[in-house]
Image: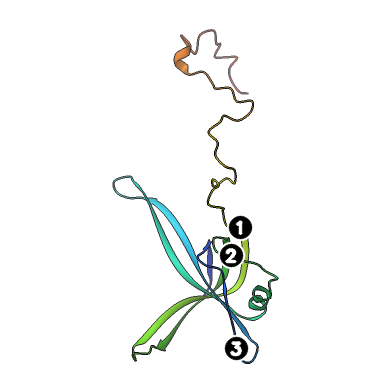
């Protein structure tokens, strides 16, 4: 079985190629990232770039504007992994690995650069109705006056 599922952000706005017979091909790059801790316990983010190719009705929908995708959009892509070869202008044989997408769905639009990842600008102010919780050190004995039999949650 040859099946690829990716969730990531588009690296550019999709490019449309129209062939003489009227068929359309969409080409776009997509970045996927994974975070992990290295042996020194530091967070490391690894980003991989994928070439995505779309044909058929899905390509027509994108090319005709019925599906409007832009650089930075968070996308779900499902398809097949294909490797093709070609000879470049210097005569060297080159290999390209692509995902031939059967499904593409926008999960979230691109984030504006000036906004936080939650969609709201950061102002530094506390939310309305915010009351800080007193720290344990403000109480002489946090268990004083409690009855263990009455504190059970059941």
Task: Give residue 26's quadrant in the image.
Answer: bottom right
Rounded to the nearest angstrom, the CA distance separating label 1 from label 2 is 8 Å
Q: Secondary structure at mark 2?
A: loop
Please report the residue visible at 33 percent of the width from the left and 88 percent of the height from the top.
92
Q: Are marks 1 and 3 in contact (CB under 8 Å)?
A: no
Place of residue 154 in the rendered image (x, y in percent of width and height, measured from the top left): 63, 23
Please report the residue visible at 29 percent of the width from the left and 46 percent of the height from the top.
40
Q: In the rendered image, which residue does mark 2 sit on?
A: 70
Going from N to C along the chain, the mark reached first, 2 or 3, is: 3
Up-down relation of residue 112 to residue 126 (above or below): below
Task: Give residue 96's quadrant in the image.
Answer: bottom left
Q: Are marks 1 and 2 in contact (CB under 8 Å)?
A: yes
Q: Secondary structure at mark 1?
A: loop
Q: In the rendered image, which residue does mark 3 sit on?
A: 19
Q: Residues within 10 Å of mark 3 (few under 14, many from 20)?
A: few
Place of residue 86 in the rendered image (x, y in percent of width and height, measured from the top left): 42, 88
Q: Are marks 2 and 3 in contact (CB under 8 Å)?
A: no
Q: How is the image coloured?
A: rainbow
Rounded to the nearest angstrom, the CA distance separating label 2 from label 3 is 23 Å
Report the residue that reaches farthest toward the left.
40
Please report the residue visible at 37 percent of the width from the left and 90 percent of the height from the top.
89
Q: Secondary structure at mark 3?
A: loop
Q: Could you tell me if residue 60 is visible in this image? A: yes
Q: In the rendered image, which residue does mark 1 sit on?
A: 109
């Amino acid at each position: 079985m040859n099946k690829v599922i990716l969730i990531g952000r588009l690296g550019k706005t999709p490019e449309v190629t129209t062939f003489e017979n009227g068929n359309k091909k969409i080409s776009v790059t997509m970045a996927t990232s994974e975070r992990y801790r290295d042996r020194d316990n530091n967070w490391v983010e690894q980003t991989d770039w994928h070439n995505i190719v779309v044909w058929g009705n899905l390509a027509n929908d994108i090319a005709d504007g019925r599906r409007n995708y832009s650089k930075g959009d968070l996308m779900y892509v499902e398809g097949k992994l294909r490797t093709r070869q070609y000879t470049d202008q210097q005569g060297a044989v080159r290999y390209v690995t692509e995902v031939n997408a059967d499904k593409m769905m926008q999960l979230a639009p691109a984030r504006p650069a000036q906004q936080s990842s939650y969609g709201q600008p950061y102002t530094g102010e506390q939310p309305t109705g915010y009351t800080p919780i007193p720290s344990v050190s403000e109480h002489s004995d946090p268990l004083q006056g409690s009855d263990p039999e009455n504190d059970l949650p059941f």
